Image (spheres, rainbow, N blue to C red):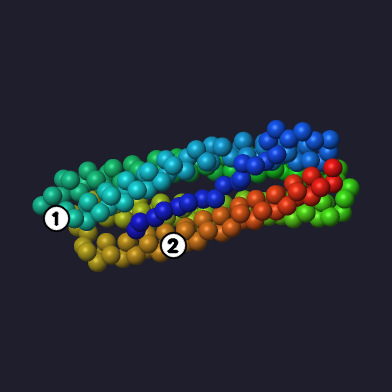
Amino acid sequence: MKKTITAAVLSSALLLGACSESSVREDLNSVLNDTLAAEEEYLNVQSELEELEQSEQQMFESVMALTQEEMKEVNELSAEALASVEERLALLETEKESIAAAAEQFEEIDSVIAEAEDEAIISELEALKTVMEERYAAHQTFIAEYEELAVLQNELYNLLGDEETDLEQLQEQTTLVNEQNEAVLTSVEAFNQKTEEFNTLKNSIIEQLEEEE
């Protein structure tokens, strides 16, 4: 049931402080910086999510080590785990809002594409737009998978706190949680790949714009 999510981020080398006579470069700089700023809340919740996930894992392991005679402790830990899931979902909502705001900011890339004259640069900017749209789509997939994982974890923690639950039920639910956890990790990997593609392409465009000045 252990889960470690490490999400790649947009690289911070977004032409910060650049002094340029190129309007395309200046406008691209503005769009990228505004997009990164909008993603700040998304970045801020990552460490909190990770802490809650690790804490929940410890609670789960503690519960599994307890006996039927220690049902009071089982109930307490199960309740804590359920509360942790709710905390994570609240953080996830913040993350969703941050990414949605960033996606809206990035739509300004259309004006940068419109003002560009070099066909090679236009093509690269359009590719950059496509990769970023795919990145945000990958994040939506992650959100859906993560929310489904939370549902399954809730069911597991409720089973843990029910004296009528038998070992077979716990094993079946744990299997479902682990399988969904793999789906979450796969979606994170897809998001990370698109983030890395974006960073690489962005750096390539920056170099081309610098060479043209």
> Residue 23 vs residue 64: left or right?
right
Q: Residue at x 61, y 52 (%)?
A: 195
Q: How many marks?
A: 2
| Disc 1 packing (10 Å; few <14; some 14–19; many ≥20) | few
Q: Residue at x 42, y 40 (%)?
A: 48
Q: CA distance from mark 2 to mark 1?
A: 29 Å
| Disc 2 packing (10 Å; few <14; some 14–19; many ≥20) | some
Q: Along the line of sight, which residue is nearer the eye, 18 or 110?
A: 18
Q: Position of residue 196 (x, y in %)?
A: 61, 54
Nearest-to-viewer mark from 2 and 1: 2
Q: Position of residue 176 (x, y in %)?
A: 37, 63
Residue at the left extreme, as displayed: 69
Identify which amino acid the numbered label 2 is placed on.
Glu
Q: Along the line of sight, which residue is nearer the eye, 210 or 128?
A: 210
Q: Are marks 2 and 1 in contact (CB under 8 Å)?
A: no
Q: Quadrant of the N terminus?
A: bottom left
Residue at the right extreme, as displayed: 117
* Secondary structure found at label 2: helix
Q: Along the line of sight, which residue is nearer the eye, 117 or 39?
A: 117
Q: Residue at x 35, y 56 (%)?
A: 2
Nearest to N terminus: mark 2 or mark 1: 1
Q: Position of residue 33 (x, y in %)?
A: 67, 37
Q: Position of residue 160 (x, y in %)?
A: 25, 54
Task: Reply above or below: 43 against 137.
Answer: above
Q: Which residue is mark 1?
A: 67
Q: Residue 200 — which label? A: none
Identify which amino acid the numbered label 1 is placed on.
Thr
Q: Which residue is mark 2?
A: 182
> Residue 83 vs residue 90: left or right?
left
